[in-house]
Amino acid sequence: MKLTVWTYEGPPHVGAMRVATGMTGLHYVLHAPQGDTYADLLFTMIERRNHRPPVTYTTFQARDLGSDTANLFKTSLQDAYARFQPEALIVGASCTAELIQDDPGGMAETMDIPVPVIPLELPSYQRKENFGADETFFQIVRTLAKPMQRTAQITCNLIGPTALGFRHRDDITEMTSLLSDMGISVNVVAPMTARPSDIARMGAAHFNVLMYPETAESAARWMERELNQPYTKTVPIGVGATRDFVSEVAKITGVKPYLDDSRLRLPWYSKSVDSTYLTGKRVFLFGDGTHVAAAARIARDEMGFEVVGLGCYNREMARPIRALAKDYGVEALITDDYLEVERVIEALQPEMILGTQMERHIGKRLGIPCAVISAPVHVQDFPARYSPQMGIEGANVIFDTWVHPLVMGLEEHLLHMFRDDFEFHDAAGPSHHGGHAPKPDMEGGPAPQAALSPRDISSQKKQGADVIWLDDAERELKKIPFFVRGKARRNTESFATERGVSEISIDTLYEAKAHYAR
Amino acid sequence: MTEVPRLPTSGGCRSEPILKQRGQREVFCGLTGIIWLHRKMQDAFFLVIGSRTCAHLLQSAAGVMIFAEPRFGTAILEETDLAGLADAQTELDKVVDQLLARRTDIKQLFLVGSCPSEVIKLDLSRAAERMTEKYAPSVRVLNFSGSGIETTFTQGEDACLASMVPVLPETSERQLLLVGALPDVVEEQAVSLLTQMGIGPIKVLPAPRADTDLRLGENIVFALTQPFLGDTHAALERRGARHLPAPFPFGEEGTTAWLRAIADEFDIDAETFERVTAAPRTRARKAIAQASEALRGKSIFFFPDSQLEIPLARFLTRECGMEAIEVGAPFIHKGIVGPDLDMLAQGPTLSEGQDVDLQLDRCRTARPDLTVCGLGLANPLEADGLATKWAIELVFTPVHFYEQAGDLAGLFSRPVRRANLLRLEAAE
């Protein structure tokens, strides 16, 4: 038994839903109690999908247990086939149904459904969402894809994008265009956009582009073995990675490497003088392994940040992320415990977090700017505009997204120069941060509530600092620009605590400043 | 003199046939109630004993994470817990030990059953008894089920409140007990109106803290503020308390009838009642008249969700001029919503339970001007050109009593007004 407050990943059947919802012409019959239908809202609300996910839940109740859950499953499957007429079905159990051991796959087999019915074994008490997506896609591919004659021209499959994926929609467009520039067309994109009949013709492609190892690596390996299709190992997020990807594709296909970088702006934006202030910004990275690895390279090599910590929540990627961390001279944090991530961030005091929507909340609480680089994501991470992460435009988008939460370079200088000015006083706030909303309490007050959140009737958590700030030191602290003040306060306090100083004077403040100066 | 609400001349819906279908339900489980209950009970921790799905549900239903370390969490069952039940109890003790050691602010701990814990028959009442002894007197440990095989959405609150009833101490004093978790602002309004009439003492279940002087006994009369509290109602009656049946306090008419039922019980004269209610009633009517302009003559269709559907249909048809096509509720407890059914004119289909595909077919055929449904259905229906109102907002937002009556109408009129406002097609 493990106490969990927030989770990075849902249960594995949610991963299966991400595959099913991304596809068309596929239907998922899920043996599950009624409460599990909450998962629909992930897709209809967070991703704003305009259709219900293609999922039929059996919604058994307590009174069905021990009597009729098996029949309920059969009826649901029959009805779902009749109503939705899918090209193929996937069937499985959620955590509760796994316990009653009705064997959806076995039952389906006895039922003469005239289309392929693919059984899923997703161990809910061991594995999580990404595994569920990866395994589901693998089972679908394994059942439906067959070796076949290759297309005359060089083609590839784009594999990995799913519903509820971080920018998958736009990455597909970007990759399609990048490959097209090299004269390579896309045979099938899967699971997102594919029908079961498209999966059946995946074998016609010359190779696979593995966009997201989290959701399609098992399928990629199987196709490499069974369909003789090599797959790409580079995930083209960032300028360097995109160039590497182009070389890798060239090597696989024998096509001349080509990248149209006429619209690429990240390198110049990063070199331009306004970006000087980005130099050595201390960033902490957390997310899924793939996005963290890509972001680390961009952060260090393309933005000039200092990576002070990194990690991932999916244990499947623990090994590569540990190796990567070693390269960066930091300790990898491999955990799905949100509170542990928060503790590490609090201890490291980065100037920016590149994380998931969970870290966005940590950032809000600690007063540290945060940009989202990985799932899990929220409704604002499905922007209306074209906003890929991959390829040339992805690099441009990343530059903007990462710089946006920071105080702008010129503005940072002005704030320093005029920090006692009547218009630049603290309460005014930076001009681009949400219309002069009062700055959240640096000690960690409640984060602003979003539309769905319930009413707030609780009190703030207190911090147990035993050191006292003398009046003149407190006044001096107020002269420090607000966006670094929280850090200055905490640094000074831990400096004082470490030395057994119980009262902080102006001297203590500046000794701490000198101590932490880099 | 306050006029008694006029009952529909054609007869109310109390004896109307109810459509019952059995198929896929598209509803939350009772765990969802933790989201608002933990805000209300400020020294309580809700520990779900369940799976990753439970934790994921709570997180998704909450929409965002408001606090780094909330007063709810999930003890996620792992493979090893499923192997032997004795071990599961020991494991649970360990988790609770850790939790209470770290959170000394916790005075009430609810062990919340889930689908998996029910299926493996993990005995949480035994665990709660054991822990109550262990942690007495600093922490009270109770248990209830929020599982999706036994509870639907708001029934979680019902199960939680019902679990508190048996442990309340006995009293012979005559008191009024208001039952249901309401936002503080709304609760204070209700207490203030009743106090102004001279009614008291007034207590509220759930209380914000464990150490309040809630008592039960034969001289307690209680009024429900939420229609989904069937089990709590039964538990209170078992303790000898007496229910004051009334329409629910939504809208001017509902609030007046609800207050009237209590006032009659406490022999409050008509003048006093009038003096206390006249001004807020006028305000409520005015606010409703304004907010409901867009709703007059419009049709509405309710998918089953919170059990608020029948009282809300009564409010919307009688005070906002809407026409109800179908009023679906997860459960219809006539002992509780009977007075609302009496006031709801015959006409709409009443349905209990759900086969969501068939109900969607009915809804698409009827093409109502407004559909009240859960979050999973809202956008797909909007994409079909049907304006929707998410039902979950009705439990999260202050909507009870006079001063919120206009806001309540506004929740329904906003999507209708929005549908009229948007000009997204070409002019010609």
Image: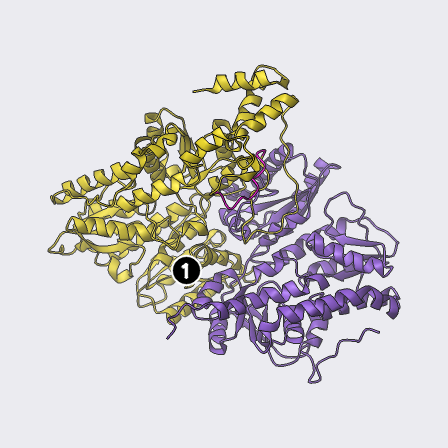
**Residue A245 in view:** yes
Residue toward you, A292 or A32: A292
Of all chains, the one bearing label 1 is A
- Res B106 quadrant in image: top right
**Residue B332 in view:** no
Label 1: which secondary element: loop
Q: Which residue is mark 1?
A: A49
Q: Which residues are magenta?
A: A433-443
Give how far across and how far down residue B284 sits, in percent: 71, 67
Q: Is residue A397 left or right of residue A371?
A: left
Image quadrant where one finds the C terminus of chain B: bottom left
Dominant SS in magenta:
loop
What's the residue type where badge 1 is placed?
A: Arg
- Res A423 quadrant in image: top right
Q: Is residue B199 left or right of residue A138?
A: right
Q: Which chain is yellow?
A: A
- The answer to if A438 sits in the magenta stretch is yes
Q: Identify the hue of chain B.
A: purple
Q: Is residue A309 left or right of residue A210?
A: right
Image quadrant where one finds the N terminus of chain B: bottom right
Q: Residue at x 61, y 53 (%)?
A: B33
Q: Residues within 10 Å of mark 1 (few under 14, many from 20)?
A: many
- The answer to if B120 sits in the magenta stretch is no
Q: Residue at x 77, y 62 (%)?
A: B223
